């Protein structure tokens, strides 16, 4: 990681002119991960989920209330009261409440009279109907916890997709780089052969038509080289578009004197991962995980809606005591004679709204379950398809490796026959062009293979980069 930070510092200071830097795929992806806006944007999603959870926790915050009022008319104090109280929401819908009341005046309602030292109170409000199993604040906190997990999965999914896209650009750049090198060597070889043919023509060993064919070959390969050089510049610009510096500053392609690393062609997937069941792999995918988490969120909503189809029965229990010390003189007799009890009961007669809300919640849950099953199945199929494609590409690489070897033998044989006068320049050029085409196809297959491997890692959520 220190090397990568140093590399970014070099980028921010000026061009890398001393020598070309060989940039590996892992180094490139680490640089992409460092400051790319998509990565930073994904981090914002995680931060947002953190504060959503903090907001839900706020539903359990203690609440302080103070009520004070007095009435004085023609110099007569009718009443003067002060009631500070604190409410503490607890789990299971229970509210803990404590207060201290002072009340004085000439016209105080008898039921509001309190001892001279004031009246202390501590009590509970307990739901025995609606809100006993689950309530809105508990559901909000549980959903916020799930939302945090979903945000982490979303972040991982965005980064995984970014890595897949960045890898596609890297191998495209690598492919164009290798083909450029192939045709640069092919142009040099064609020029050397053209000079040799020209010399043989002057000596009377070859007809003039061979010099024209040699010249056409040079020109056609120079055109092919020019085409690949243009593609190389374009693919390098696409590659660098994924690299950013601090403060959202994009890297200038002109600052980079880099070449790709062919060692990436040795990239392999572990047998343990390849042999894993597709259904298990699908579950590891962050997008599929989020479908599962969404089901859990909707299940919480269903339970909350079901709880609404209950009468509201809240029981209030409290202990009274004179002065601020609520625990003073506590004994069974005191508790029997200094307590407060009450309840509230309410319910709609038909529960039409609540039953409809519950039915809608069930439909949403069922819809999410079907979507989850479909997504999991599609992901498993995609995994199997990529596995089959990887096996096919590996087989093609073996085949083209053999074709390249045989084509090279044929070319060497044709060159020997040409030197002894048993062949023509046209046949030599044809053999050589066939070899070049085989190498181009081999590079293209190798590049596709890397992209397929990264897609397999993406599905299995195994695209970790330090």
Image (cartoon, rainbow, N blue to C red):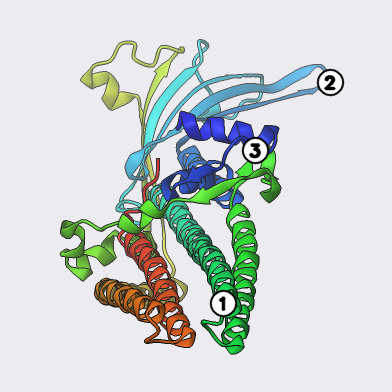
**Residue carrying label 1:** 203
Q: Earlier in the sequence, mark 1 or mark 2?
A: 2
**Residue carrying label 2:** 74
Residue 355 visible, this orientation:
no
Vertical side of 350 occupied by 29: above or below:
above
Q: Nearer the viewer, residue 425 or 8?
A: 425
**Residue carrying label 3:** 17
460 left or right, relative to 198: left
| The furthest residue to the front | 203
Q: Secondary structure at mark 2?
A: loop
Tell me what residue is drawn at x 58 percent, y 75 percent. Answer: 221
- Find residue 407 and name its label: none
Vertical side of 261 occupied by 87: above or below:
above
Alpha-carbon span between mark 1 and mark 3: 47 Å
Vertical side of 448 occupied by 270: above or below:
above
Tell me the quadrant of the picture where the N terminus can be found.
top left
Tell me what residue is drawn at x 38 percent, y 42 percent. Answer: 342
Proximity of marks 1 and 3: CB atoms separated by less than 8 Å? no
Q: Nearer the viewer, residue 334 or 288?
A: 288
180 left or right, relative to 1: right
Q: Position of residue 143 (x, y in %)?
A: 41, 53
Q: Nearer the viewer, residue 310 or 385?
A: 385
Alpha-carbon span between mark 2 and mark 3: 95 Å
């Amino acid at each position: 990681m220190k090397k990568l930070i140093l590399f970014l510092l070099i980028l921010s200071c000026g061009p890398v002119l001393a020598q070309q830097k060989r940039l590996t795929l892992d180094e490139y992806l680490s640089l992409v991960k460092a400051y790319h806006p998509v990565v930073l944007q994904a981090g914002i999603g995680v931060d947002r989920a953190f504060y959503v959870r903090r907001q839900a926790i706020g539903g359990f915050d203690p609440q302080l209330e103070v009520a004070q009022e007095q009435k004085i008319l023609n110099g007569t104090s009718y009443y003067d009261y002060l009631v500070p109280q604190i409410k503490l929401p607890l789990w299971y819908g229970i509210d803990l409440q404590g207060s201290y009341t002072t009340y004085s005046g000439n016209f105080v309602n008898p039921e509001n009279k309190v001892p001279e030292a004031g009246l202390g109170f501590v009590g509970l409000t307990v739901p025995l109907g609606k809100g006993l199993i689950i309530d809105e604040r508990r559901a909000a906190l549980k959903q916020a916890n799930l939302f945090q997990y979903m945000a982490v999965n979303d972040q991982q999914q965005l980064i995984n997709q970014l890595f897949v896209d960045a890898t596609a650009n890297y191998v495209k750049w690598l492919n164009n780089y290798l083909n450029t090198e192939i045709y640069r060597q092919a142009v040099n070889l064609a020029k050397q052969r053209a000079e040799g043919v020209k010399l043989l023509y002057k000596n009377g060993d070859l007809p003039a038509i061979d010099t024209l064919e040699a010249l056409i070959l040079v020109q056609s390969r120079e055109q092919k080289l020019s085409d690949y050089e243009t593609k190389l510049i374009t693919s390098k610009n696409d590659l660098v578009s994924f690299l950013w510096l601090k403060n959202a500053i994009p890297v200038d392609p002109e600052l980079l004197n880099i070449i790709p690393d062919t060692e990436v062609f040795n990239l392999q997937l572990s047998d343990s991962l390849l042999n894993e069941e597709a259904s298990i792999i699908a579950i590891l995918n962050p997008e599929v995980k989020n479908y599962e988490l969404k089901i859990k969120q909707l299940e919480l909503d269903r339970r909350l809606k079901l709880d609404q189809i209950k009468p509201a029965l809240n029981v209030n229990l409290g202990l009274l005591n004179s002065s601020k010390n609520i625990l003073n003189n506590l004994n069974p007799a005191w508790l029997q004679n200094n307590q407060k009890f009450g309840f509230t009961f309410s319910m709609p007669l038909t529960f039409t709204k609540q039953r409809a809300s519950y039915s809608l919640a069930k439909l949403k849950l069922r819809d999410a379950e079907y979507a989850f099953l479909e997504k999991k199945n599609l992901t498993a199929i995609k995994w199997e398809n990529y596995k089959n494609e990887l096996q096919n590409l590996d087989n093609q690489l073996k085949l083209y490796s053999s074709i390249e070897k045989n084509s090279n033998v044929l070319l060497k044989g044709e060159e020997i026959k040409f030197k002894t006068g048993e062949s023509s320049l046209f046949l030599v050029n044809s053999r050589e062009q066939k070899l070049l085409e085989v190498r181009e196809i081999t590079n293209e297959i190798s590049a596709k293979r890397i992209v397929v491997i990264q897609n397999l890692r993406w599905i299995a959520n195994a695209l970790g980069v330090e």
